[in-house]
Image (tube, grey):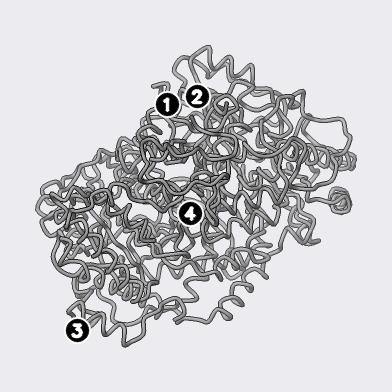
Amino acid sequence: MLNNVGRPTRPDAANHDDLLMEETFTGNKALNLETPLIFEQGVKGRIGVDMAEPRAIKNRLGGLEKSEDIGLPDLSEPQVLRHYVRLSRQNYSIDAGFYPLGSCTMKHNPRINEKSARMKGLGDIHPLQPVSTVQGALELIDDLAHWLKTITGMPAVAMSPAAGAHGELCGVMAIKAAHDAKGENRSIILVPESAHGTNPATAALCGYKVQSVPARKDGRMDIEAFEAALSPEVAGVMLTNPNTCGLFENEIKKIAELIHRVGGYFYCDGANLNAILGRTRPGDLGVDAMHINLHKTFSTPHGGGGPGSGPVVLSEALAPFAPVPYVVKSDEGYSLQENVTGSAGKSFGRMKTFHGQMGMFIRAMAYMLSHGSDGLRQIAEDAVLNANYVRVGLNDLLHSPFDGICMHEALFDDSTLKNTGVTTLDIAKAMIDEGYHPMTMYFPLVVHGAMLIEPTESETKETLDLFIGSMRHLIEKAQKGNDPDFFTQAPKYSPRRRLDETAAARKPVLRWSKENAA
Amino acid sequence: MRYMPHTAEERAEMLKKIGVSSVDELFVDIPEEARLNDLLDLPTHAPEMVVEKKMQAYGLKNLSPAEVPSFLGAGAYRHHVPTVVDHLVQRSEFLTAYTPYQPEISQGTLQALFEFQTQVAMITGMDVANASMYDGATACAEAVLMSCRATRRKKAILSGNLHPHYREVTETTVQYTEFKVNSKSPVVEGPEDFSEELDQEIACVVVQNPDFFGRLQDLAELAEKCHEVGALLVVVVTEVVSLGAIKSPGEMGADIVVGEGQSIGVPLSYGGPYVGLFATKQKYVRQMPGRLCGETVDQEGKRGYVLTLSTREQHIRREKATSNICTNAGLCSLAFSIHMSLLGETGFKKLAMLNHGEAVAASEKIDAIEGVRVVNETFFNEFTVELPVKAEQAVERLAERNILGGIPVSRLLPEHAEFDNLLLVTVTETNTEEEVDQLVDALKEIANA
């Protein structure tokens, strides 16, 4: 039975004798502090925000006055502060340690970005103020757009998508709108097997059938299979480059040429843009649309799952179909085109309220100004350098499914763990005990037991050396096979041990309620 | 450069270990003709001090609503955010964590999400809520898609008094699917009638409360009519503080409630990032879009939280997923949750009645201006004012006097010339009586010029 009234439940001593740590009366262990749910705290009548008394007026609520209890707990400010401080300490973070989560680009989050997002005139302006009162905001959006277009070598950018998947939707909708404008009704989008799950999900949302293209032995998309799949029914291809195996699609120009030859468009998933900043431009590779994850490449923090921002750069062919709103610059200053009627092109619509993720634009702008053209190129070089350093530090012990140089992330499979009884998951959980956030596991799907390691440019050589040493220690320990519990019981030192995800899904408890608290 | 640690010697040493002689050899897979040899045509790196000045310069060219009388709403509202909120969301452990895919070392984010889901479910009067969407409008679009899945029907009706951006985002999102939306015309005065459109083919009716013009309505009857023909009622809330003063959509019979959570804890930030709320009834859980956090136990029997029911999501189901959403509004949902925890039941209701009281008082002053009329009979903290002149011109003239006096309806509904004189005015707890008087005085001059 769960203890829902404050103190955490005692471990089940009968089954896990050997694993028990010393018990305390409170359930806390020195700096390891528990906190019950917010709903299990508080006393009715407390308040954490002082405010004026409401006026005595004749209300205008039309008979809809609230009479029921909502059920929210009442707490004081220090109580709330303590609750969230305690919660925060149960999180791993890039500020606290190495976070080599492949495909996620967990790099340093500069604090000048945060400060900028809160500046007067930036963090506090309303999206529908008269345009004459927000010229600085529009200038910032226009400047950021210029940087994004220059970095990618593309002529246009749609700024409003809220995240990567939302950017994909923007790009594929532009493709759909472009075909529609030509009176073509194509039905298929090609997506490589190794793609992020968002790619096929996005294509489906635009009414396309998804056709999968297999990978070649060297980890790139199979060009012959791709060519064979091409037909007048194909609207486009969605390809990540560098791809999810951490490899540059070296035949990308051929891919672009082939898709264009059948009248299709080339969507590039820009999740891995970090690897090529200042070294090559998608515009020179034949790309028609690509989203840019500002929260990855330009470090507008991940925030425990968002918010993100996913501007989409577009080719000449797709630019007329970009969603509203967009900034228009003229001699009189900046203005906004906010409505489809009256837009110059053939805009496919609107993706979001207002003008996009301004708070993220501000952070990304500060990040770009800090780095400049030289710093951006250095990002790609150091990110790729670090990934290859990890690769050669481990590839005599772990098997790389694809030979040779990688880009910003190093990929291994689990073949050297065969017959050890230890899985990729176990290694990941043992890494937690060593003080690391695990790498990405079991993705991409094309590699068995995949371990995808992305160190980013932020990390020192010392950090990488220690990480390589830790990984070697764990792999060697697994191969010796004399202590299987070490892995299956990991992590031992985290705020929680392995959690029962099957039970969570079988009988979902998605909220606290008075009834199930008893 | 301050963010990158390697020295030239270290880089050389690492290249040697890798077995290449230069960094260029790491980029050989890039087609030769597409390689960049020179730097991009952009400024080079800058010290923090320089960046800070440049960023401040952008801000100084804008008029901050915090510094002048400001009465702006239409889907984004200025409320006081307690200092504690911003302090907490800037803690490294929240700010710089990824999505909590490793629950053993992400219990902070996960428990906060579980609490957020509970708070959202409570205030909307629903059984369950997800871990957030991008914003209110995208949540609205997802609600329409979900209604079509859940009812196996293909048509949705959107109220004419839905925020125009919500309507446009929904129409845009749905346009290439097999589903169709029928958007009605706006109705400024009198009730909106759905009886003509509502039949057995309709998946859902989407209405906003308070609506785009600020009007409140009892939705119980509409809910009943929807349910009679097997359609769902989707209720949109763009000003979430209103839920502290009026009956919850759940109590009025809503099946799905979506909304914009910005009012609680999230800065205006020129329109984003905000936080989309999405709540529904227990029986539709497996049709929901987005991430869900659930309770479970760990190996030692301790209560803990995990992301769950992920078989609905894109990383597992790919093209058969309920939505393509991945990254959501994470940190904004945390800010919402912290602010809501500070308010509590007592504070949330008090804040709502404080807003309503200030708005009622201001509306009476505005309505008393000759030639000016408050259109609404009912409202929460935002109402529609009819001016004797075009609202867009009035707003420009108010801005010249450093008053952000409201939002012209024509900015959002430019195709409706009959609304050109309508101004949306919002009054919150942040507005002083002096500010209201300044607005009233300025409106008097403009109305009688």
Q: Which residue is mark 2?
A: B204
Helix, strand or loop at mark 3: loop
Helix, strand or loop at mark 2: strand
Instruction: Please indicate whether residue B78 sits to the left or right of residue B139 in the image.
Output: right
Real-space CA distance between mark 2 and mark 3, rounded to the nearest whole angstrom: 64 Å
Q: Which residue is mark 4?
A: A91
Residue type at numbered disc 4: Asn
Instruction: Please indicate whether residue A117 sits to the left or right of residue B103 in the image.
Output: right
Residue type at numbered disc 1: Cys
Q: Nearer the viewer, residue A399 or B394?
A: A399
Q: How many marks?
A: 4
Helix, strand or loop at mark 4: loop
Residue located 63% across and 57% down the image? B86
**Which residue is outermost to the bottom?**
B9
Residue located 38% across and 47% down the image? A169
Q: Which residue is mark 3?
A: B21
User: Label 1 crowding class (10 Å Cα cut-off): few <14, some 14-19, many 20+?
Assistant: many
Q: Which residue is mark 1?
A: B148
